[in-house]
Structure formats: C-alpha cells, structure tokens
Amino acid sequence: MISELTLIRRIRELAGAVDESLIRGIGDDCAVLAAAGLQTETLVTTDTLVEGVHFDLAWHPPELLGQKALSVNVSDIAAMGGVPRFALLSLAVPATAGQELINPLMAGFIAALERYGVRLIGGDTVKSDQGLVLSVTVLGEARAGTVVYRSGARPGDQIWVSGYLGQAAAGLELCRRSHELMATYSDLVAAHVNPQPEMTLGRMLGASGLVTAMIDMSDGLASDLAHICEESGVGAEVRAQDLPVSESTRQAAQALALDPMRLALSGGEDYRLLFTAPASAASQIDGLAGHAIGGQLFSVGEIVSGAEVVLINETQRRAIGFQGYDHFRGNLDLPQHCLQTLGTAKTSGSA
C-alpha cells in the first residue's frame, strides 16, 4: 500500500507550479497566502477527525472532541508563528446521532472558538454512513516576514521540543486497554482527548526571529523531525537520554508493558512544538519559554549535514528513519535495532 508521505509527494507534484499570491503551498503545517497591500500573510490549514481512526466515542466525551477538532488546527497555526482568526466546520453525522451527541459536541467547539479568539464563518453538514467525521479549516495570520517554515533548519542548529513526549499516546493506550487505570493517569488521558496547542509560544517564537524551522508534533517526533529534515535538506542527531518523558508516562508504560521511548518517538498527537534554532540562541529561547508557558523547553539534538535522522546514546548511534504515525500503514513500530538502542537510554522529567 502507498505510504502517506508518498501520497503527499505525488499530490504535490500534480498540483504543479504556483503564482505569486501563494507564498507556500503543500509541504508545511499551513499554506501561506500573500495579502495584497497588507503587512500580514494569511495561513490556511485543515484537519479531519474520523470516528474509528482518530477517536472512539466510547471514551472520548463529545464536548472534548469538539474542542480537539479546533485545537489540532490551531496547533498548525501556532507552528507557523501565527494567530488563528476564522474557522469553517464540516460535519458528516450518522443518521442515528441525536441531540445527546450534537449538543455537547458543538458546545465544546464553541468553547474552543471563544478560548482561541476564532470566529466560525461557515462550513457544511452531510449524512454519514460510516460514523462521525469532523473536518475543520482554520485561517490565521502572521506579520509578513515572520512565518516559520519547516525548510529553514541548518547544520549546527539545536533541536528543541516544548514539553513532554508520549503522553497522548500513553493516554490512548490507557483508553484502549485499561479503563481501571484511566483515573490514575488522568493527565495522560487528558493529553489524548483534550490537547492544548502552544499558541502563545508559537507566536513568540515566530516574532523572535530566532527559530529556523518549526512543526507541531502530530505524528511523533521521529516522523515530524523527518519532515523538517526533508524540507530543509539536512539530517539530525537525536540524543536518547535527553528525550523528555514524564514520570506518569513511564509508570503507565510499565503498567501496560509498553516502551516509554517508543511512545516518545512514534506515539503521535503530542501537539508540542518541535523547532530548530542556532546554538547561540539557546539562552534567549529558554527566556521565551519561561515568559510564554511558564515552563521548560528541552534541547534534544542537533541538525547535521546529510539526510539521515540518527538516534544516539552514550555508546551507540542508529538511524531511526521516518518512523511515526502513517494513516495508510497504521502506527508504525520503530525498527528492532532502535529499540535495543533505546533500552539503554534514560528518561527524564516528572509528571
């Protein structure tokens, strides 16, 4: 079966050349449109959530699902350094769905609109024979010249992430496999059902001029870092011992017989920001984090020449390739040799 990345590349080829009104098309978190006569650029992104693929109503409250449908799009805008402004919502609703589903779903979506300062300006509704589907398009804006793309990483840049990794993936596995443990690890369940985009941090990083490339982590660090490397024409070295994994993620992984490092690298749906910046900007980057999120950023590696994405620890270095979530192949496991490497790596952080 064709991979998701291969399909995107093919669509990009078929789309052909663009004119001067389109600054950036396929290949980034958002398309970027020039706004004639204005000092801003328009960002456009879309995401679709499909029942049975992205969520299960058995454990995903409709109100939080409505919030998530907007949040994952806002995260794309944040990853470009922009501010969300308008949204379109399209719903494919099963004929069996009643007010007990639609009312809280829309209440959650409206609450998210208010939280992010976004206006709903249109959309579509149709009947679905295959479960609930939510497709959201968000338009945002950024000051001209401040948009951060995936394509600017350069050898010597440090690789940063804006929070703990693998929490949402651990939360999903808890929902799937152990309802008894869901209350114990409610923070992990919340990371899955109600992600919080890094809107303030993304805007500040974009405005700072310090960041060379950025992406939001929806598919997992391994896959999303590979996107940056491909667009930038570079490689990367990731330090296994510096990947931030919370204590609750480690404990839940142990209870479920999962590898926490596998969750961190290829779990997906973290919706943290993954970005690169020159090593000389490290202290300024840390200062921005404290001001924007009151928390810590984590330096997890370095951009290098070449095209390989490599995982290193004290004694080994192994290529980790483009592993991560792929809609056409499922949630891919890392190669066994990577897991052997990870087995000697230490995790960091606390819940």
Image (cartoon, helix red, strand yellow):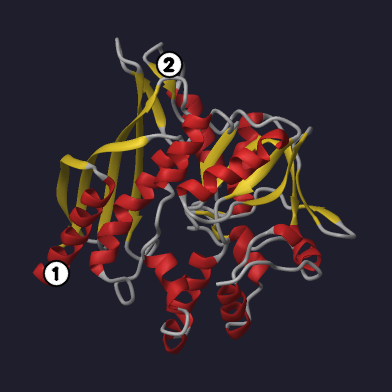
Q: CA distance from mark 2 to mark 1?
A: 43 Å
Above or below, comparing residue 264 to residue 204 in the picture? below
Res 158 quadrant in image: top right
Identify the residue position indicated by label 2 in the image.
18
Identify the residue position indicated by label 1 in the image.
96
User: Residue 89 location in percent, x, y?
Assistant: 21, 46
Whether residue 38 is visible, yes or no, is: yes
Above or below, comparing residue 324 to residue 194 in the picture? above
Q: Residue at x 26, y 51 (%)?
A: 115
Q: Nearer the viewer, residue 37 or 98?
A: 37
Check whether the beta carbons of the residues at disc 2 and disc 1 lie within 8 A of each other.
Answer: no
User: Residue 14 location in percent, x, y?
Assistant: 46, 25
Whether residue 29 is visible, yes or no, is: no
Q: Residue at x 48, y 58 (%)?
A: 269
- Could you tell whether 263 is left or right of 66 in the image? right
Q: Residue at x 21, y 50 (%)?
A: 114
User: Residue 64 location in percent, x, y?
Assistant: 28, 65
* Amino acid type assigned to the residue bearing label 1 in the image: Thr
